[in-house]
Image (spheres, rainbow, N blue to C red):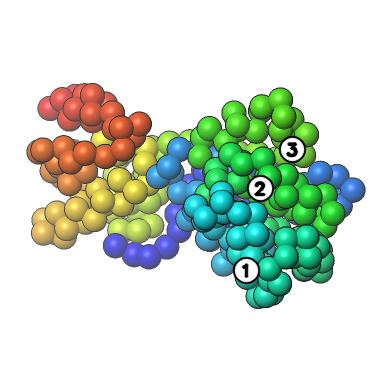
């Protein structure tokens, strides 16, 4: 299985938000929000964008929720600037630094930021004073949190947003082709989508197994028979437990039953 990033519909939507914010005038609000459930490729998308475009990236840490200083120190470190340990001074230094570079700042795992008023308010201050695009990457409930009455002034600054959706059949066919040089019909792609719940992490597991089976059978096509066998690597005979909100075994079983 090759290393690489598949140009999914989600990836294109992500890039569209980042590029739209970058193109906006500094006089306009330029905060963005990328959100969706885990496993759909949000972090992969921002890592790809970071590697191919001028921007800065930082991943939120759980410790940020205990101290705004830690958040500012980590963001400054992303710019290779050493913090002084005094919040007021460090915030001003961060504003100067962000403004000097003038390129987007991405904050991944931003659920930890939006859940604490001091953190998201500080991020808003940095945006307002630097006039540089800041994009939050968070789970699906982030938009609801930002919709609270006390955060309405923050939400109003988020002028571009994109929700990551489950992978489409076309995304799955493209991933099989680009990562494994395997082809899959639309019917097989639909089956894979149901088994993997539209989740990129589960799709990777599936494709690894499908690639092994196809190599053994000396074929470059994922047939329905091969897909059914590879599906066992995802759901397994014993169905290994996963996060409750992501497990929809009835969908997976239905797909296997429908496939015969």
| 2 vs 1, front mark | 2
Foreground tag (3 vs 2): 2
Quarter in which the N terminus is drawn: bottom left
> Residue at coordinates 51% horizontally, 40% vertically from top-left?
139
Q: In terms of depth relative to the viewer, which is nearer, 220 or 227?
A: 227
| Disc 2: which residue | 119
Would you say residue 233 is visible in this rendering?
Answer: yes
- Horizontal and vertical percent position of residue 182: 28, 54
Mark 3 to mark 1 CA distance (whole Å): 23 Å
Q: Give left or right: position of 41 versus 235.
A: right
For the point 78% across and 60% down, the residue is 88
Q: Are discs 2 and 1 less than 8 Å apart at CB?
A: no
| Residue 20 in view here | no
Which residue is located at x 40 percent, y 45 percent? Answer: 39
Residue appearing at x 45%, y 49% in the figure: 41
In the image, residue 109 above or below residue 224: below
Where does the image place residue 19, in percent across and percent down from the top left? 70, 52
Q: Are marks 3 and 2 in contact (CB under 8 Å)?
A: no
Which residue is disc 3 drawn over? 154
Label 1 sits on residue: 78
Q: Earlier in the sequence, mark 2 or mark 1?
A: 1
| 162 in relation to 176, above or below | above
């Amino acid at each position: 299985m090759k290393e690489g990033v598949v140009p999914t519909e989600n990836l294109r939507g992500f890039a569209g938000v980042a590029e739209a914010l970058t193109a906006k005038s500094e006089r306009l609000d330029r905060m963005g929000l990328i959100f969706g459930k885990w496993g759909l490729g949000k972090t992969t998308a921002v890592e790809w964008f970071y590697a191919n475009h001028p921007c800065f990236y930082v991943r939120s840490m759980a410790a940020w929720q205990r101290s705004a200083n830690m958040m500012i120190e980590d963001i400054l470190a992303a710019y290779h600037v050493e913090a002084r340990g005094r919040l007021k001074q460090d915030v001003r230094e961060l504003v100067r630094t962000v403004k000097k570079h003038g390129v987007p700042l991405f904050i991944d795992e931003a659920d930890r930021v939006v859940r604490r008023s001091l953190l998201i308010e500080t991020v808003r201050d940095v945006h307002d004073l630097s006039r540089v695009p800041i994009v939050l990457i968070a789970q699906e409930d982030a938009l609801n949190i930002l919709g609270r009455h006390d955060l309405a002034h923050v939400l109003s600054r988020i002028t571009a947003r994109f929700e990551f959706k489950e992978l489409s059949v076309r995304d799955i066919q493209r991933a099989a082709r680009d990562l494994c040089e395997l082809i899959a019909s639309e019917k097989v792609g639909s089956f894979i989508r149901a088994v993997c719940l539209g989740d990129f992490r589960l799709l990777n597991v599936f494709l690894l197994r499908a690639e092994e089976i196809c190599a053994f059978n000396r074929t470059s096509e994922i047939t329905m028979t091969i897909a059914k066998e590879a599906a066992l690597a995802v759901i397994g005979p014993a169905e290994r437990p996963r996060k409750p909100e992501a497990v929809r075994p009835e969908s997976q079983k239905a797909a296997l039953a429908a496939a015969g």
